[in-house]
Amino acid sequence: MKNILKIFAAVVIVAGLSVPTAQAGNDERRGTAGAYELLVNPWARSTGWGGVNIANVRGLDAMFGNVAGLAFVKNIEVGYTNTILYGGSKGLNSGGSINSFGLGIRVFDAGVLGVYVMAMSFGEIDVTTEINPEGQGTAGTFSPSYMNINVAYAHSFTNTIHGGVNIKLVTESTDNVSATGFGIDAGIQYVTGENDELKFGISLKNWGPSMSFEGTGLSLQMINTGGNSFTVETRSAEMELPTCLNVGLSYDFLFEKWDQRLTVAGSFTSNAFLRDNYTLGLEYALLNLVQLRAGYIFQPGLWTNDAATAKNGICAGASVDIPLSKKEGSDIGLTIDYSFQSADPLKGTHAIGASLRF
């Protein structure tokens, strides 16, 4: 088991340092990747403090932030979150919506299998042409959709070291053009301290081969000098996945009165195709029933109006745990989560979700 752990840790660290950090934060590569929806967190609990919980994320949320945290599912956990992205789903200018569904099942004493699906839609968007560049509905509408399907496995190697791997299938499509690809996430969490109050995590996300678009939408009808029409099929350029490396640290301040906890967390994200992100967050828990959290995502250029993404600034959220069993020591319960993320200069993002533990 120790040899397996060493190999797993070496793969995550070496791959993470060699792939995404080679040109991390390089503005010359900004916007050259594809499938950027893979960087959008669909879970309300972790978005409430900006996804800063790389070291201490637990349950279904871990399949996005750090898959190693999936190992903390005790028996069965099922969850759903709806996200109103940048204001709504009534067209491109109003943003979109995300629906995510996840399931985690403990299959071994130290292993948990997880599955989650994330589907993103943008409503109806006007078709534009050379003749009618404004669209305005006269040429019809189209509705793009993004989806990724994830299958993950997390394992507790010891009481302090946990690791996991997530394999994802990525699809993007309209009515006549589509692209398909796949990627891999891997992560490790280390827990220490008398009461497990200190945690460290590292995760590599979206590592995989390039993908490209195909379909009849890439074909053009042409007429030659003789007046004969023919079809020209163009090829889409390949696009790489938005690989990134996340490193996080958290510490719990525990208070016996009313079972209070204050968690301070920080994380660093090294993006291969975007500027790097720095996130700080706080979470306060009371009686193991209510959690309040807030975070701040900083990217170089944010304070000078030169940010490269709307995913920055202040975020906040809350969770309420509702026990469904009076049996002492039982973990059966329902959790309701809500989060808000600022997205200057776009409208803010709201997410609400629920998860059920058996």
Image (cartoon, grey):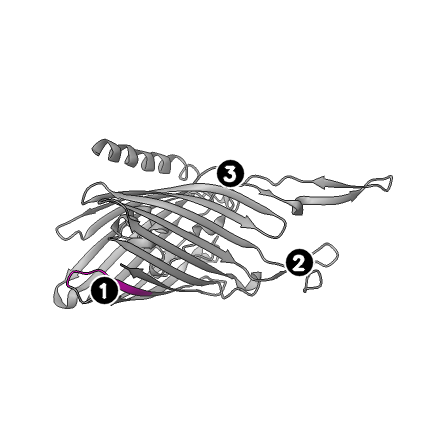
Image-based side of 307 in relation to 185, left or right? right
Q: Which of marks 3 and 2 precedes in the sequence?
A: 2
CB within 8 Å, label 1 to label 3: no
Image coordinates for residue 106, horizontal then vertical, percent: 27, 49
Number of marks present in the image shown: 3
Q: Quadrant of residue 101?
A: bottom left
Q: Nearer the viewer, residue 107 or 301?
A: 107
The answer to whether residue 318 is above or below residue 157 is: below
Q: Which mark is residue 210?
A: 3
Q: Which residue is painted at 29% across and 44% down in the image?
A: 154
In space, the residues marked 2 and 3 are separated at their CA atoms by: 28 Å
Image coordinates for residue 292, horizontal then vertical, percent: 28, 66
Q: Residue 127 carries which label?
A: 2
Span shown in magenta: 328-336
Q: Which mark is residue 285?
A: 1
Q: Which residue is painted at 18% across and 67% down in the image?
A: 326
Element at label 3: loop
